[in-house]
Image (cartoon, helix red, strand yellow):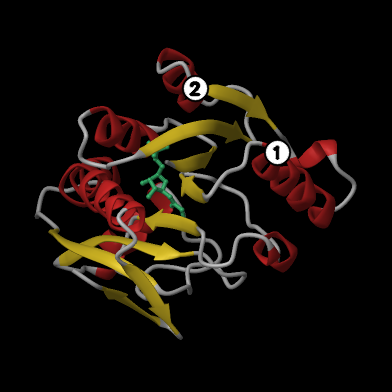
Amino acid sequence: MLRIGVLVSGGGTNLQAIIDGIVSGYIPDASVELVISNKKNAYALTRAAEANIETCIIGRKQFESPEAFDEALGDRLKSAKIDLVLLAGFMAILGPGFFTDFKNKVMNVHPALIPAFSGPGYYGLKVHESVLATGCKVTGASVHFVTPEVDAGPLILQQAVEVKQGDDPETLQCRVMEEAEWKIYPEAVRLFALGLLEVRGQRVYINN
Ligand code: GAR
């Protein structure tokens, strides 16, 4: 059984997609054991509670340094014996120390086709605002393994999404979630649960 821990900050629709993927059997032999939020009002916490998943709040301001915050997150995840950590709209950056225990065991979903519109400062609606301001006709979402460099870890899956003429950042965000994020994130976790992902340098091979 793959024990999953999910880090969240907001609405938790990607968390929901993972929970639904497990409940439906699409993601085999896995369970979300713990949801950690760095924001106490995150709606993702309600979603977790409704699914009977243990939750906890660990905020950056409780700690003197980013390293102490990372250590607290890592300790909590290790004490729950978590095998795979999913960042799902988690709006904090994890430092290098976090990855000693979780190398190639942390995934993130990003709402653009990395390396476009990614890196420090590109998160949430800001990504879609930038896509529209640039006049792109195509955007999408990416799932990748997380490394200390923001949005630069090995890519697992990407899905393109059309930008439509009438789009504003909110309509584009919704389409990217529906057509890409909520599909490729459960799919990446399914492949991990089946042991089909192999990381070689910057590339991820899917052995199916
Ligand atoms: C999602 O669009 C996710 O890709 C994005 O925040 C949103 C969270 O929504 N993450 C980032 O921008 C990370 N760089 P959710 O809380 O409903 O899953």
* Residue 54, horizontal then vertical, whole percent: 56, 22
The residue that appears at 65% across and 58% down in the rendered structure is 94
The residue that appears at 24% across and 72% down in the rendered structure is 207
* Quadrant of res 109: bottom left
Quickly name the residue at label 2.
53
- Crowding at dot 1, Cα within 10 Å, few <14 / some 14-19 / many 20+, comes out as few
Q: Is residue 56 visible?
A: yes
* Residue 19, horizontal then vertical, whole percent: 34, 31
Label drawn at residue 79? 1
The residue that appears at 70% across and 68% down in the rendered structure is 96
**Who is closer to the viewer here, 108 or 105?**
105
- Element type where label 1 sits in the image: helix
Callout 2 amino acid: Ile
Q: Is residue 59 left or right of residue 173?
A: right
Disc nearest the viewer among 1 and 2:
1
Residue pushed farthest right? 64
Please report whichever mark, 1 or 2, sits nearer to the chain's N-terminal start: 2
Mark 1 to mark 2 CA distance (whole Å): 15 Å
Q: Is residue 205 left or right of residue 151?
A: left
Callout 1 amino acid: Ser
